[in-house]
Image (tube, helix red, strand yellow):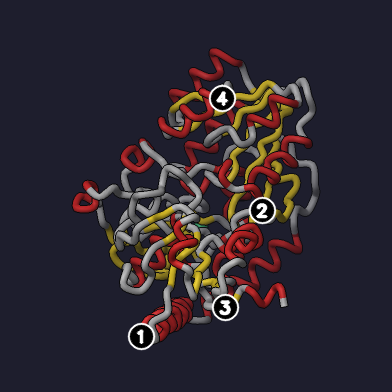
Amino acid sequence: MYQCKCCNGSLVQELIDLGQQPFANKYPSEKQKKNEMIMNLSILICENCFTAFTKTIAPRDIMFEEYFYLSSVNKELVNHFNELAKSIPSGSNLLDIGSNDGILLKPLMKRNVDALGIDPSENVGKIANDKGLKTIIGFFDEKNTNEIIKQYGRFDYVVASSIFTHVEDSEKFVENVKKILRDDGTFILEIEYIKNLLSNIEFERFYFDRPYYFSIKGIMSLFEKVGMYVNKIEEISPHGGSLRFYIQNKKSIKNPHEKLLNDENIFFENIFKSNFKEKVLREANNFKKFLTNNKNQGKKIVGFGCPARFSTITNFINIDKNLISLVIDDSPLKQKKFSPGMHIPIMKRETLLEIKPDIIIVFAYEYFESIYEFTKQFSAKHYKPIPLSLLERKYE
Ligand SMILES: [Zn+2]
């Protein structure tokens, strides 16, 4: 029997078993291909607070020592953080947890905000530090929290964007946030919303890096345990529909988020009644059949964008380079390496000039507009993999 770490309830059921999966953000070189760690990825969900989590937690230190995800490669994310930076008053101080390559620190520095980052990935943190964006390399754990308070004091703002899902011990994390934030400070938390993930059947967003997938009810109960309150929620666009929570030590609204919570309740009642697993299998089979049929007709199929979800999809459905011959990614850290598990070669976009693909599967579909600016020169059709759909439709 499993216990939910958000609400401590025991009404936990399996949402989906995604089979044997590698670490979705570890891109092996030719040499490393033989030594990948593979584990079973099963996702459980709490029927009380709707938080989902992985049944097994993969070792965090191995996962994050070398990381390939650079936020600043994505123009849309750069814009997102520029906008967020504008809302932080100059003269204040801010801690960005999981600051990656300094995507938020950079615009804050220009605004005269005293900004500090902390990130566990040595290679990524170094990129930030080399640009003069102050970044501590390490996990946001108790030891580093105390160390930071000693050296920098407490903060007016603490930000954690798209990283809370990666944290192994969310209760401990919340306690550390409480400790490092000033009494009148604001914690800005951005998470991908489990409701959006499930309603779009985006099973590909489940992978070992992320042991938790949060609901509004789950976040509220987690913070209330330490006497912190969600005073505002905004819907934001990154990562296929996310939420931004403003969390403070004082409760400033009476009946918080009644409508959102009510919608959430109704949605999950339906999820528990329907068969999510079956829906996922149907979409997965549909995608594989499409690839096989086109391959048999001699079509050249490539992928565009090799984010972590590429790994979940290809390993779950068993898609190798016979079906998708290569995948394009703009991150120089991934190029000339291979996709996790299925070992599909990763190339820079210029490779397509020689290949002239017939079909492009856009795995980084939220960036389709900027991808299309480049790929429209080929007479290829563009598809979102799950649920399989033609992307050009947007432009017709
Ligand atoms: Zn729960």
Q: Quadrant of residue 22?
A: bottom left
Marks 4 and 3 close (CB-CB < 8 Å): no
Contact between marks 1 and 2 (CB within 8 A): the answer is no
Residue reaching furthest top?
151
Viewer-nearest of labels 3 and 1?
A: 1
Where the N terminus falls, by quadrant?
A: bottom left
Residue 336 circle label: none
Q: Which mark, residue 296?
A: 1
Mark 2 secondary-structure assignment: strand
Q: Residue at x 74, y 22 (%)?
A: 112
- Report the Cα–Cα distance between label 2 and label 4: 29 Å
User: Is residue 191 depicted above or below 83 in this figure?
Assistant: below
Amino acid identity at mark 3: Ser
The location of residue 359, given as percent across then percent down, is 49, 74
Q: Which residue is mark 2?
A: 243
Q: CA distance from mark 4 to mark 1?
A: 49 Å
Amino acid at dot 4: Lys
Residue 182 shows up from this direction: no
State the residue in front, 332 or 201: 332
Real-space Cα separation, disc 1 to disc 2, in angstroms: 42 Å
First along the sequence among labels 2 and 4: 4
Question: Could you tell me residue 323's position as x and y percent?
Answer: 35, 74
| Cα separation between marks 3 and 2 | 25 Å
Residue 389, numbered circle: 3
Please report the residue visible at 64 percent of the width from the left and 60 percent of the height from the top: 373
- Mark 1 or mark 2: whose residue is earlier in sequence: 2
Neighbourhood count class around disc 3 (C-alpha, 10 Å): few under 14, some 14–19, many 20 upward:
few
Label 2 within 8 A of ligand 1 by Cβ: no
